[in-house]
């Protein structure tokens, strides 16, 4: 059976991915309080250009994400720091398109204390490896808010290329019009990107 005839449910299956620094574990309802604790490190919900849950929204946030997973649209993970076994954030595959073998990596955030470490690079390395080498994707997208410059720079450091800006792409949770910056990595680019990520992670481990 060719990949183009595989349904979303059989293409994007829950899976645990593990590196040296983190484990990516499929999100479940019982992770709700741990996610809130992670978001509280830095009060991440105060960043107006991101969608990080607060004490008022965390339950609906988790339920919405799990509903998207049931619909075959996404595969969410919690990020578990191996050194402490604590949940330090979340990330996911989303906007999955099994017919065209494309997927987006996004909705990513981490507790403030773990930012600017090798954790984000390793998370992306794990997700990209699974996407290109197991799901056989032909392209992986990244999207972020125009004003989220730390995210834009982090995506570029991965080796993704900017495709363009979607003007007035969404109305965000503040009722503001959002411009979305779109990046991607193609399957033909993956070998070079992988080598670069491996080199960066070796430096982080040393």
Image (spheres, grey):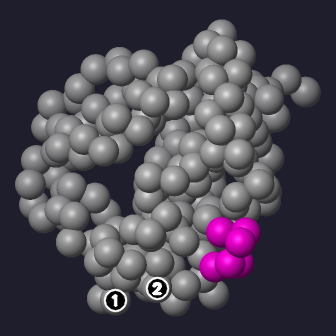
Residue 149 position, x and y percent, is 25, 41
Magenta stretch, main secondary structure, is loop
Q: Which residues are magenta?
A: 81-86
Mark 2 packing: few (<14 Cα in 10 Å), some, or many (20+)? Answer: some
Report the residue marked by disc 2: 37
Residue 206 position, x and y percent, is 71, 45
Tell me the quarter of the picture where residue 172 sits: bottom left
User: In the image, is residue 181 above or below residue 2?
Assistant: below
User: In the image, is residue 100 above or below residue 181?
Assistant: above
195 vs 110, left or right, is right
Residue 135 position, x and y percent, is 76, 34
Nearest-to-viewer mark from 1 and 2: 2
Tell me the quarter of the picture where residue 8 sits: top right
Number of marks present in the image shown? 2
Report the residue marked by disc 1: 55
Is the N terminus in the top left, top right, bottom left or bottom right quadrant?
top right
Cα separation between marks 1 and 2: 9 Å
- Please identify the residue farthest to the top as the structure is shown: 188
- Please identify the residue farthest to the right as the structure is shown: 1
| 66 inside magenta stretch | no
Q: From this viewpoint, is residue 59 visible? A: yes
């Amino acid at each position: 059976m060719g990949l183009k005839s595989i349904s979303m449910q059989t293409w994007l299956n829950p899976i645990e991915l593990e590196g040296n620094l983190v484990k990516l574990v499929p999100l479940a309802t019982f992770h709700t309080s741990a996610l809130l604790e992670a978001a509280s490190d830095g009060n991440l919900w105060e960043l107006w250009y991101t969608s990080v849950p607060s004490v008022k929204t965390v339950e609906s946030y988790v339920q919405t994400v799990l509903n998207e997973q049931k619909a075959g649209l996404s595969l969410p993970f919690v990020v578990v720091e191996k050194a402490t076994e604590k949940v330090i954030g979340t990330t996911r595959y989303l906007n999955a398109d099994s017919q065209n073998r494309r997927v987006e990596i996004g909705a990513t955030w981490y507790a403030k204390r773990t930012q600017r470490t090798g954790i984000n690079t390793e998370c992306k390395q794990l997700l990209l490896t699974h996407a290109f080498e197991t799901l056989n994707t032909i392209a992986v997208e990244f999207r972020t808010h125009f004003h989220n410059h730390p995210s834009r720079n982090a995506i570029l450091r991965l080796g993704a290329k900017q495709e363009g800006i979607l003007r007035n792409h969404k109305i965000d949770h503040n009722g503001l019009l959002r411009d979305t910056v779109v990046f991607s990595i193609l399957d033909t680019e993956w070998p070079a990107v992988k080598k670069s990520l491996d080199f960066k992670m070796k430096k982080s481990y040393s």
